[in-house]
Image (cartoon, rainbow, N blue to C red):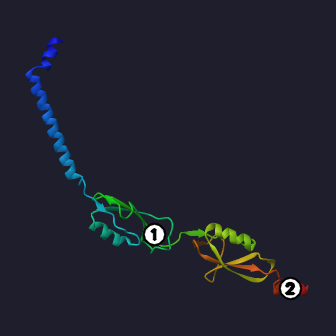
Amino acid sequence: MRNFFNFLRSKVFLIQLGLALLVSILLIFLVLRWLNSTTNHGEFVEVPDFSKMSVPEMRASIAEVGLRYEVLDSANFNPEYPRFSIIEQNPPAGNKVKENRKIYFTVNPSGYKKVTVPKIIQVTQRNAASMLRAVGLDVARVTYIDELGKDMVYQLKHKGKYIKPGDKLPKTSKVELICGNGTIPEEARIQADSE
């Protein structure tokens, strides 16, 4: 044990310890310099506002500022933005990021997704309107025909064409309900009179 303590106080050990410290400090200094140069320490790019840009416009702009991108699909159509334009970006505009950072974009689809027209024939007008609203459709207007079931839905129209339950329409479409007015149709009345 005494020899060990003598070695720790010897000139050889102190010189080796000094050289090891010098090499360690030099190595740390070189690593930090290398990291600064490869990570662009302190150099940032401000993220531009890409909202409402088309995808080709966004590609050109993002290349100019030295960023990368990834386009994500969007499930919900936003009528306030042009079709196939950027509706959301992450990180948001104005943030400072490193060069070559990836920006994630959400793109507005071409239109509303399609929904299925519910089974509303022989259902009251009030219930039919609720069922249509539940799937994302609206009642544009109600017209009446001579049918015995007052306020009962007999037919449906969309943009002047007859449609049926199970058909697909873009969400937020407006549907016309054709309901009975509570009177017997003329043909049925004539047939009943002749009997």
Q: Nearer the viewer, mark 1 or mark 2?
A: 1
Mark 1, Cα crowd under 10 Å, few <14 / some 14-19 / many 20+, is: many
Say which amino acid is labelled 1: Asn
- Horizontally, is 189 left or right of 115 in the view? right
The residue identified by callout 1 is: 108
Q: Position of residue 23 (x, y in %)?
A: 13, 36
For mark 2, what is the residue?
Answer: 189
Query: Closest to the observer: 164 or 24?
Result: 24
Quarter of the image containing the C terminus? bottom right
Say which residue appears at 84% left-offset and 84% top-offset.
188
The x, y position of residue 184, in whole percent, is: 83, 82
x then y, percent, for residue 29: 17, 43
**Measured along the vertical axis of the image, is residue 15 above or below residue 88?**
above
Q: Quadrant of the N terminus?
A: top left
Mark 1 or mark 2: whose residue is earlier in sequence: 1
Against 22, residue 48 (above or below) is: below
Question: In which quarter of the view is residue 187 placed?
Answer: bottom right
Residue 82 screen position, x and y as percent: 44, 75
Amino acid of disc 2: Arg
